[in-house]
Image (cartoon, rainbow, N blue to C red):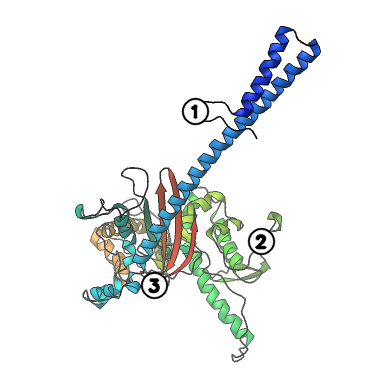
């Protein structure tokens, strides 16, 4: 392959040789030496050689430039990757602070046992990340420390005033678990005492019915408002989608249904036929949230609105401090035993033109945001959460009581966080890399991570 043009402006030897050949052929043609045919062939060959060499030279220059830019992009991507990884590692230290640093346990014990148990350090994990990224720490606008001039603080971002990494941390328990109603094929234990198959089947059905009912209420809270928005033709389509999700994750091939009493049961028919799409129902837990797009009845538009509110990990109860208001409304309205009162409170406009439950939830969201702004946990116990709705009508002067049943609410909602999601972003110039991690706060283990 001919060499590229040197930086000093001289021509490469191969190209110069071709030009000399072309020059001699042209000169001979002009002087009239040789036959006309020979002169024409020589000139044509010279032009062909020059054209080929020119094409090779242009291609070589293009490849050289492309490789140069590819190397630069790879360098930027690698640096952004490590910046995102640094943010994740710092956040993990903060999430597991109680476990990793015994001195912190001693310090927190000075606050009292109950306060120490309620304090969730993970909520401030990204504040620590920001300190390492910028070298600065502020509290209510007051500068506490400034190490921005230290070389060991921060990372390279190539942009003045732009931190090399940042992150957000949220409670995974605030999301609806798509695998809540999933069942596994029972494995016989040879050492266990024999159990009557009928009794075992009844016990399994009871557990699945309870979990299916919880999933129906939680997913229904997210999906029901979409009926009025035109994303579903009718309310029955919402129920069909939830039943199809249950059938996708349970271990049997029998279609699930809802009986007149509102209990989930086996309808006896076949589950949806996915053969027309080229695959079969999974009959086990979903591995990713994106998998729900395979379920019959889940449109792309509905999925795009839901995906950030769903999870597939073994979360516990829905965390009321971070949960979507639609999910909370679904659970709270389901806990109202009287159907007439439920319709008046959750569906019909109240004295202010808004459904009383919606008005209470709007106020709840304001309280949650205010408490988070002052580094406080909105609700430290479920009794405080239910008291909010008991006291809201009198405090706001609406005169419409909210008769929620706390025992029903407590079965699905809670204030503890079992799973935490860390979304760390690394920045290097115009290149960004994102690392998403899910952490089990009870063990400190990283149960899932992926890069984007």
In the picture, measured across the screen, residue 34 lies left or right of residue 307, that is right
Q: Which of marks 1 and 2 is nearer the N terminus?
A: 1
Provide the residue designation for mark 1.
Answer: 8
Within the image, what quadrant is residue 13 found in?
top right
Left or right, 386 with respect to 449, comes to left
Residue at the disc numbered 3: 410
Estimate the spatial distance between the alpha carbons at disc 1 and disc 2, rounded to whole Å: 72 Å
The secondary element bearing badge 1 is classed as loop
Element carrying mark 3? helix
Residue 7 belongs to the span the image colors magenta? yes
Q: Which of the pair 22/249 is nearer the observer?
A: 22
Q: What stretch is highlighted in magenta?
A: 1-9
Task: Work out whether residue 85 can be spotted.
Answer: yes
In-image side of 24 versus 210 (left or right): right
For disc 2, the marked residue is 272
Q: How far apart are marks 3 and 2 (CA)?
A: 34 Å
Whole-percent x, y for residue 256 in the image: 61, 68
């Amino acid at each position: 392959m001919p060499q590229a043009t040197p930086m000093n402006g001289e021509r490469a030897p191969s190209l110069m040789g071709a030009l000399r050949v072309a020059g001699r052929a042209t000169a001979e043609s002009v002087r009239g030496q040789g036959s006309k045919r020979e002169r024409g062939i020589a000139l044509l060959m010279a032009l062909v050689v020059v054209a080929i060499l020119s094409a090779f030279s242009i291609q070589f220059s293009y490849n050289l430039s492309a490789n140069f830019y590819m190397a630069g992009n790879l360098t930027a991507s690698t640096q952004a990757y490590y910046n995102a990884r640094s943010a994740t590692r710092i956040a993990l230290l903060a999430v597991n602070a109680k476990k990793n640093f015994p001195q912190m346990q001693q310090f927190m014990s000075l606050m009292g046992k109950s306060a120490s148990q309620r304090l969730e350090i993970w909520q401030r994990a990204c504040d620590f990340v920001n300190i390492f990224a910028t070298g600065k720490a502020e509290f209510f606008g007051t500068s506490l420390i400034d190490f921005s001039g230290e070389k060991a603080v921060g990372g390279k971002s190539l942009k003045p005033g732009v931190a090399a990494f940042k992150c957000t941390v949220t409670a995974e328990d605030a999301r609806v678990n798509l695998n809540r109603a999933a069942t596994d094929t029972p494995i016989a234990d040879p050492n266990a005492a024999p159990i009557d198959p009928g009794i075992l089947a009844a016990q399994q059905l009871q557990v699945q019915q309870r979990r299916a009912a919880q999933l129906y209420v939680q997913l229904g809270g997210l999906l029901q408002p979409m009926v009025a928005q035109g994303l579903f033709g009718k309310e029955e389509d919402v129920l069909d989608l939830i039943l199809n999700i249950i059938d996708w994750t349970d271990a049997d091939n029998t279609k699930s249904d809802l009986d007149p009493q509102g209990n989930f049961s086996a309808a006896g028919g076949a589950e949806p036929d996915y053969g027309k799409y080229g695959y079969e129902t999974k009959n086990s837990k979903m591995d990713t949230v994106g998998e729900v797009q395979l379920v019959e009845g889940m449109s792309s538009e509905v999925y795009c609105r839901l995906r950030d509110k769903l999870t597939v990990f073994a979360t516990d109860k829905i965390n009321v401090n971070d949960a979507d208001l639609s999910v909370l409304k679904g659970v709270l309205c389901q806990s109202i035993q009287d159907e007439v009162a439920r319709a008046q409170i959750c569906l019909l406009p109240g004295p202010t033109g808004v459904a009383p439950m919606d008005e209470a939830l709007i106020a709840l969201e304001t309280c949650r945001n205010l408490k988070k702004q002052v580094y406080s946990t909105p609700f430290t116990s479920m009794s405080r959460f239910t008291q909010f709705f008991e006291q809201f009508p009198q405090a706001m002067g609406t005169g419409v009581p909210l008769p929620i049943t706390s025992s029903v609410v407590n079965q699905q909602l809670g204030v503890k966080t079992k799973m935490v999601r860390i979304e760390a972003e690394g920045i290097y110039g115009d290149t960004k890399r994102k690392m998403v991690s899910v952490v089990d706060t009870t063990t400190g283990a990283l149960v899932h991570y992926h890069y984007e």
